[in-house]
Amino acid sequence: MTTSFLKAEETVTFAQQFPNVHTAEVIAGEFGKNVNDVMDQSVLSCTEFDLEQKGLADVTGIDVFTNLQYLNLSSNQITSILESIGKLSDLQILNLLDNQLTNVPESIGNLTGLIGIDLSNNHLSVLPLSLIKLQSINEYLNLSNQTISLLPKDFITQSFTLTSSITAMGEVVPHLLAEQVIV
């Protein structure tokens, strides 16, 4: 699945940018618009987006908001995040708490300005190798309530403070159960 990218000279409606009808309706509504309205510069320059508990299952197209610094997608039914999330280069806080995620894309490592990410209460069993690139994370990395069975080997060199314990299998369990996690 490819994501359409809105260019400055294009006029694209919410319905065209977001293939999921419900997602288009929710996002347009956040700006007081309807799905057939054009996404103008006032919409595209958005830096904070709180989409908590909006019943979203698919956020394909969200990468059009390239100025985002804060993105809250918590408490939805999102099952996957596309590789295009890595294009949100200004993102500092990403909240994906309490969704249905089973994996995190490798492109998460492109978010080098990220200082906090909450992935708790999902269905993650594997973390991407690119997560170790996120050395900027200094506020929080919340991975609580997961069944992580595989961590990247290089993850051991990183140090993160977790807000809760992680259920994990394998040799890394003692490290994961410490408050200061060196994974």
Image (spheres, grey):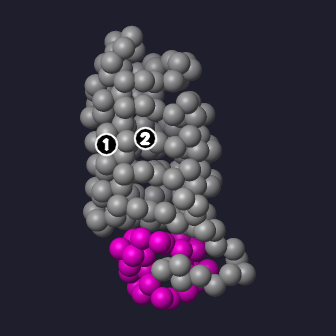
Identify the residue position indicated by label 2 in the image: 103
Q: Residue 122 bears which disc, if any?
A: 1
Looking at the rendered image, the disc whose residue lies closer to the viewer, 1 or 2, is 2
Residue at 36 percent of width and 55 percent of height: 78
Extent of the magenta region: 17-46
Q: Residue 104 location in percent, x, y? A: 46, 42
Tag 1, which secondary structure? Answer: loop
Q: What is the distance, in whole Å, between disc 1 and disc 2 at their CAs?
A: 9 Å
Please say whether residue 107 is visible from this viewpoint.
yes
Q: Residue 27 location in percent, x, y? A: 42, 74
Is-magenta flag for residue 81? Answer: no
Type of the residue with mark 2: Asn
Question: Sequence order check: which comes first, mark 1 or mark 2?
Answer: 2
Residue at 53 percent of width and 71 percent of height: 46
- Local crowd size for mark 1, using a 10 Å CA cut-off: few (<14), some (14–19), many (≥20): many
Residue 151 lies in quadrant: top left
Type of the residue with mark 1: Asn
Q: Residue 32 location in percent, x, y? A: 41, 85
